[in-house]
Amino acid sequence: MIISDYHIHSHYSFDSSEAMQNIAQKAIDQGLKEIALTDHFETLDPNMNLNQIIDYKRYYQDVEELREKFAGKLTIRLGSEINLEKPMKSQMEDAINRYPFDFIIGSLHAVDFVDVGMSEYYGNLSVDEYHRRYFEDLLDAVKDGFTFSVLGHLDFVTRYGGYRNNIVDVRKQYDLLREILTNVIDLGRGIELNTSAMRYRLDDFHPSVNILRLYKELGGEIITIGSDSHTARTIAQDFELAEEVLLQLGYKYYATFERMKPILNRLG
Protein backbone atom coordinates (compact mmCIF):
# COMPACT_ATOMS: atom_id res chain seq x y z
CA MET A 1 0.00 0.00 0.00
CA ILE A 2 1.28 3.46 -0.94
CA ILE A 3 1.06 5.58 2.20
CA SER A 4 2.78 8.77 1.00
CA ASP A 5 1.47 11.55 -1.26
CA TYR A 6 4.38 13.57 -2.60
CA HIS A 7 2.69 16.25 -4.70
CA ILE A 8 0.25 18.48 -2.82
CA HIS A 9 -0.48 22.20 -3.11
CA SER A 10 -1.79 24.45 -0.36
CA HIS A 11 -2.93 28.07 -0.22
CA TYR A 12 0.71 29.06 -0.75
CA SER A 13 0.27 28.13 -4.41
CA PHE A 14 -1.36 30.62 -6.78
CA ASP A 15 -3.81 27.93 -7.94
CA SER A 16 -4.94 26.61 -4.55
CA SER A 17 -6.81 27.97 -1.55
CA GLU A 18 -6.58 24.85 0.63
CA ALA A 19 -5.41 25.27 4.23
CA MET A 20 -2.44 23.14 5.25
CA GLN A 21 -4.34 21.81 8.25
CA ASN A 22 -7.14 20.51 6.00
CA ILE A 23 -4.55 18.75 3.85
CA ALA A 24 -2.92 17.05 6.82
CA GLN A 25 -6.24 15.89 8.26
CA LYS A 26 -7.46 14.54 4.93
CA ALA A 27 -4.18 12.67 4.46
CA ILE A 28 -4.67 10.97 7.82
CA ASP A 29 -8.29 10.17 6.94
CA GLN A 30 -7.02 8.53 3.73
CA GLY A 31 -4.67 6.31 5.70
CA LEU A 32 -1.49 8.10 4.69
CA LYS A 33 1.55 8.22 6.96
CA GLU A 34 3.52 10.87 5.09
CA ILE A 35 3.01 13.82 2.76
CA ALA A 36 5.18 16.39 1.02
CA LEU A 37 3.84 19.91 0.63
CA THR A 38 5.06 21.05 -2.77
CA ASP A 39 3.81 24.56 -3.44
CA HIS A 40 4.64 26.32 -6.70
CA PHE A 41 7.79 28.44 -6.84
CA GLU A 42 7.66 30.04 -10.27
CA THR A 43 6.50 33.02 -12.30
CA LEU A 44 5.68 33.90 -15.90
CA ASP A 45 6.92 37.46 -15.30
CA PRO A 46 10.67 37.76 -15.97
CA ASN A 47 10.77 40.99 -13.95
CA MET A 48 9.25 39.52 -10.80
CA ASN A 49 11.45 38.62 -7.86
CA LEU A 50 10.70 35.08 -6.74
CA ASN A 51 10.59 36.23 -3.12
CA GLN A 52 7.23 37.77 -4.07
CA ILE A 53 5.89 34.30 -4.94
CA ILE A 54 6.42 32.53 -1.62
CA ASP A 55 7.59 33.94 1.69
CA TYR A 56 9.66 30.88 2.54
CA LYS A 57 10.35 32.07 6.08
CA ARG A 58 6.63 32.01 6.82
CA TYR A 59 6.12 28.85 4.76
CA TYR A 60 8.77 27.02 6.79
CA GLN A 61 7.28 28.26 10.06
CA ASP A 62 3.81 27.08 9.03
CA VAL A 63 5.14 23.64 8.11
CA GLU A 64 6.95 23.40 11.45
CA GLU A 65 3.74 24.29 13.32
CA LEU A 66 1.86 21.68 11.29
CA ARG A 67 4.48 19.05 12.09
CA GLU A 68 4.09 19.79 15.79
CA LYS A 69 0.31 19.66 15.62
CA PHE A 70 0.23 16.29 13.82
CA ALA A 71 3.30 14.72 15.46
CA GLY A 72 2.94 10.96 15.78
CA LYS A 73 0.10 10.90 13.25
CA LEU A 74 1.65 12.18 10.03
CA THR A 75 5.16 12.89 8.74
CA ILE A 76 5.17 16.18 6.84
CA ARG A 77 8.02 16.96 4.46
CA LEU A 78 9.08 20.44 3.43
CA GLY A 79 8.88 20.53 -0.34
CA SER A 80 8.40 22.73 -3.36
CA GLU A 81 7.61 22.47 -7.05
CA ILE A 82 9.90 24.63 -9.16
CA ASN A 83 9.62 25.46 -12.83
CA LEU A 84 12.89 24.61 -14.56
CA GLU A 85 13.09 28.12 -16.01
CA LYS A 86 16.77 28.79 -16.73
CA PRO A 87 16.77 32.59 -16.22
CA MET A 88 15.35 32.05 -12.71
CA LYS A 89 17.77 29.32 -11.69
CA SER A 90 20.02 31.50 -9.53
CA GLN A 91 17.09 33.01 -7.61
CA MET A 92 15.58 29.57 -7.05
CA GLU A 93 18.81 28.05 -5.82
CA ASP A 94 19.45 30.95 -3.43
CA ALA A 95 16.00 30.62 -1.87
CA ILE A 96 16.02 26.83 -1.63
CA ASN A 97 19.45 26.70 -0.06
CA ARG A 98 18.32 28.85 2.88
CA TYR A 99 15.92 26.23 4.22
CA PRO A 100 16.12 22.51 5.06
CA PHE A 101 14.06 21.21 2.17
CA ASP A 102 13.30 17.51 2.05
CA PHE A 103 12.03 17.31 -1.50
CA ILE A 104 11.92 19.35 -4.72
CA ILE A 105 9.85 18.56 -7.80
CA GLY A 106 11.41 19.90 -10.98
CA SER A 107 8.69 20.57 -13.54
CA LEU A 108 8.61 22.28 -16.91
CA HIS A 109 5.52 24.46 -17.00
CA ALA A 110 6.99 27.26 -19.09
CA VAL A 111 9.99 28.01 -21.28
CA ASP A 112 11.30 31.55 -21.68
CA PHE A 113 8.26 32.59 -19.63
CA VAL A 114 5.82 31.12 -22.16
CA ASP A 115 3.39 28.53 -20.75
CA VAL A 116 3.91 25.23 -22.61
CA GLY A 117 0.15 24.74 -22.70
CA MET A 118 -0.45 27.94 -24.66
CA SER A 119 -0.61 28.33 -28.43
CA GLU A 120 2.35 30.73 -28.25
CA TYR A 121 4.43 27.65 -27.42
CA TYR A 122 3.01 24.94 -29.68
CA GLY A 123 1.79 27.21 -32.49
CA ASN A 124 1.16 25.24 -35.70
CA LEU A 125 3.25 22.25 -34.67
CA SER A 126 2.00 18.73 -35.23
CA VAL A 127 1.47 16.67 -32.09
CA ASP A 128 4.80 14.87 -32.55
CA GLU A 129 6.60 18.16 -33.16
CA TYR A 130 4.98 19.61 -30.05
CA HIS A 131 6.16 16.69 -27.95
CA ARG A 132 9.65 16.87 -29.43
CA ARG A 133 9.96 20.56 -28.69
CA TYR A 134 8.87 19.97 -25.09
CA PHE A 135 11.23 17.07 -24.50
CA GLU A 136 14.12 19.00 -26.07
CA ASP A 137 13.45 21.85 -23.65
CA LEU A 138 13.11 19.43 -20.73
CA LEU A 139 16.43 17.74 -21.58
CA ASP A 140 18.11 21.15 -21.78
CA ALA A 141 16.76 22.01 -18.33
CA VAL A 142 17.85 18.69 -16.82
CA LYS A 143 21.37 19.22 -18.13
CA ASP A 144 21.51 22.75 -16.69
CA GLY A 145 22.13 21.57 -13.13
CA PHE A 146 18.96 22.54 -11.28
CA THR A 147 18.49 21.22 -7.77
CA PHE A 148 15.57 18.79 -7.82
CA SER A 149 14.64 15.39 -6.41
CA VAL A 150 12.34 14.12 -9.16
CA LEU A 151 11.03 15.30 -12.50
CA GLY A 152 7.36 16.17 -12.22
CA HIS A 153 4.63 14.96 -14.63
CA LEU A 154 7.21 14.26 -17.30
CA ASP A 155 4.72 14.23 -20.22
CA PHE A 156 2.77 17.22 -18.92
CA VAL A 157 1.99 18.45 -22.45
CA THR A 158 -0.41 15.58 -23.11
CA ARG A 159 -3.04 17.80 -21.44
CA TYR A 160 -2.77 20.57 -24.02
CA GLY A 161 -2.76 21.55 -27.66
CA GLY A 162 -6.25 20.44 -28.66
CA TYR A 163 -4.93 17.45 -30.62
CA ARG A 164 -7.28 14.56 -31.30
CA ASN A 165 -4.64 12.09 -30.07
CA ASN A 166 -2.10 13.63 -27.71
CA ILE A 167 -0.50 10.43 -26.42
CA VAL A 168 3.30 10.53 -26.55
CA ASP A 169 4.58 8.09 -29.16
CA VAL A 170 7.57 6.65 -27.29
CA ARG A 171 9.03 5.24 -30.50
CA LYS A 172 9.16 8.66 -32.12
CA GLN A 173 10.46 10.39 -28.99
CA TYR A 174 12.67 7.51 -27.86
CA ASP A 175 16.03 9.25 -28.31
CA LEU A 176 14.99 12.25 -26.23
CA LEU A 177 13.16 10.26 -23.57
CA ARG A 178 16.08 7.88 -23.21
CA GLU A 179 18.53 10.77 -22.80
CA ILE A 180 16.29 12.57 -20.28
CA LEU A 181 15.77 9.46 -18.18
CA THR A 182 19.41 8.38 -18.41
CA ASN A 183 20.53 11.80 -17.21
CA VAL A 184 18.08 11.64 -14.31
CA ILE A 185 19.33 8.19 -13.32
CA ASP A 186 22.99 9.19 -13.62
CA LEU A 187 22.34 12.23 -11.40
CA GLY A 188 20.86 9.98 -8.71
CA ARG A 189 17.48 11.66 -9.12
CA GLY A 190 14.08 10.20 -9.96
CA ILE A 191 10.72 10.82 -11.57
CA GLU A 192 7.22 10.99 -10.17
CA LEU A 193 4.14 9.01 -11.04
CA ASN A 194 1.53 11.75 -11.03
CA THR A 195 -2.04 10.45 -10.83
CA SER A 196 -3.70 13.76 -11.78
CA ALA A 197 -3.85 12.71 -15.43
CA MET A 198 -6.73 10.47 -14.43
CA ARG A 199 -8.61 13.53 -13.17
CA TYR A 200 -8.01 15.12 -16.57
CA ARG A 201 -9.55 11.99 -18.16
CA LEU A 202 -6.38 11.09 -20.02
CA ASP A 203 -6.83 7.40 -19.10
CA ASP A 204 -3.17 7.14 -18.08
CA PHE A 205 -0.72 8.66 -15.65
CA HIS A 206 1.95 11.34 -15.94
CA PRO A 207 4.13 9.97 -17.34
CA SER A 208 2.34 7.33 -19.35
CA VAL A 209 2.72 3.62 -18.65
CA ASN A 210 4.98 3.33 -21.70
CA ILE A 211 7.38 5.94 -20.31
CA LEU A 212 7.24 4.33 -16.86
CA ARG A 213 8.20 1.06 -18.55
CA LEU A 214 11.14 2.71 -20.33
CA TYR A 215 12.39 4.25 -17.09
CA LYS A 216 12.33 0.81 -15.46
CA GLU A 217 14.12 -0.79 -18.42
CA LEU A 218 16.87 1.86 -18.21
CA GLY A 219 17.44 1.00 -14.56
CA GLY A 220 15.36 3.72 -12.91
CA GLU A 221 14.34 2.97 -9.34
CA ILE A 222 13.56 6.30 -7.68
CA ILE A 223 9.89 7.07 -8.22
CA THR A 224 7.55 9.06 -6.01
CA ILE A 225 3.76 8.96 -6.11
CA GLY A 226 1.83 12.21 -6.12
CA SER A 227 -1.78 13.25 -6.61
CA ASP A 228 -0.91 16.82 -7.62
CA SER A 229 -3.82 17.85 -5.41
CA HIS A 230 -4.89 21.47 -5.18
CA THR A 231 -7.77 20.59 -2.87
CA ALA A 232 -7.82 18.19 0.07
CA ARG A 233 -10.53 16.00 -1.45
CA THR A 234 -8.25 14.58 -4.19
CA ILE A 235 -5.35 13.56 -1.94
CA ALA A 236 -4.17 10.00 -2.71
CA GLN A 237 -6.66 9.68 -5.55
CA ASP A 238 -6.06 6.63 -7.79
CA PHE A 239 -3.14 5.43 -5.66
CA GLU A 240 -4.38 1.84 -5.65
CA LEU A 241 -4.33 1.80 -9.45
CA ALA A 242 -0.88 3.43 -9.45
CA GLU A 243 0.49 0.69 -7.21
CA GLU A 244 -1.08 -2.01 -9.36
CA VAL A 245 0.53 -0.59 -12.50
CA LEU A 246 3.96 -0.21 -10.89
CA LEU A 247 3.89 -3.81 -9.68
CA GLN A 248 2.86 -5.02 -13.15
CA LEU A 249 5.85 -3.14 -14.61
CA GLY A 250 8.21 -4.82 -12.17
CA TYR A 251 8.81 -1.98 -9.73
CA LYS A 252 9.49 -3.15 -6.20
CA TYR A 253 9.76 0.19 -4.42
CA TYR A 254 8.47 3.73 -4.33
CA ALA A 255 10.45 6.61 -2.86
CA THR A 256 10.03 9.12 -0.10
CA PHE A 257 12.60 11.76 0.82
CA GLU A 258 14.24 13.28 3.87
CA ARG A 259 16.62 16.24 3.50
CA MET A 260 16.85 15.54 -0.24
CA LYS A 261 17.88 11.90 0.27
CA PRO A 262 15.66 9.15 -1.19
CA ILE A 263 14.24 6.39 0.98
CA LEU A 264 12.92 3.28 -0.80
CA ASN A 265 9.66 1.79 0.48
CA ARG A 266 8.44 -1.62 -0.65
CA LEU A 267 5.37 -1.81 -2.81
CA GLY A 268 2.68 -4.39 -2.24
Image (tube, rainbow, N blue to C red):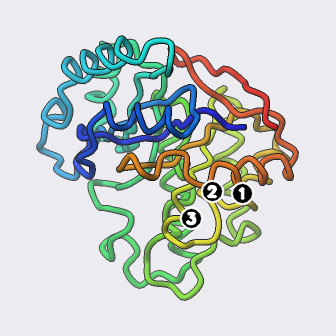
Q: CA distance from mark 1 to mark 2?
A: 6 Å
Quick one: label 1, few (<14), some, or many (20+) residues within 10 Å? many
| Label 1 sits on residue | 211
Quick one: label 3, few (<14), some, or many (20+) residues within 10 Å? some
Q: CA distance from mark 3 to mark 2?
A: 11 Å
Q: Are marks 1 and 2 in contact (CB under 8 Å)?
A: yes
Question: Where does residue 268 sit, x and y in percent of width and height?
Answer: 82, 37
Query: Of marks 1 and 3, which one's residue comes earlier in the chain?
Result: 3
Secondary structure beneath label 2: loop
Q: Are marks 1 and 3 in contact (CB under 8 Å)?
A: no
The reply, left or right, for residue 196 in relation to residue 252 is left
Question: Where does residue 15 sit, x and y in percent of width and height?
Answer: 26, 52
The reply, left or right, for residue 235 in relation to residue 98 is right
- Tell me: residue 85, above or below residue 222: below
- Tell me: residue 34, above or below residue 112: above
Query: Of marks 3 and 2, which one's residue comes earlier in the chain?
Result: 3
Tell which of 34 and 122 is nearer to you.
34
| Label 2 sits on residue | 207
Q: Which residue sits at x=77%, y=32%?
A: 253
Question: Where does residue 157 sit, x and y in percent of width and height?
Answer: 49, 66
Tell which of 180 and 71 is nearer to you.
71
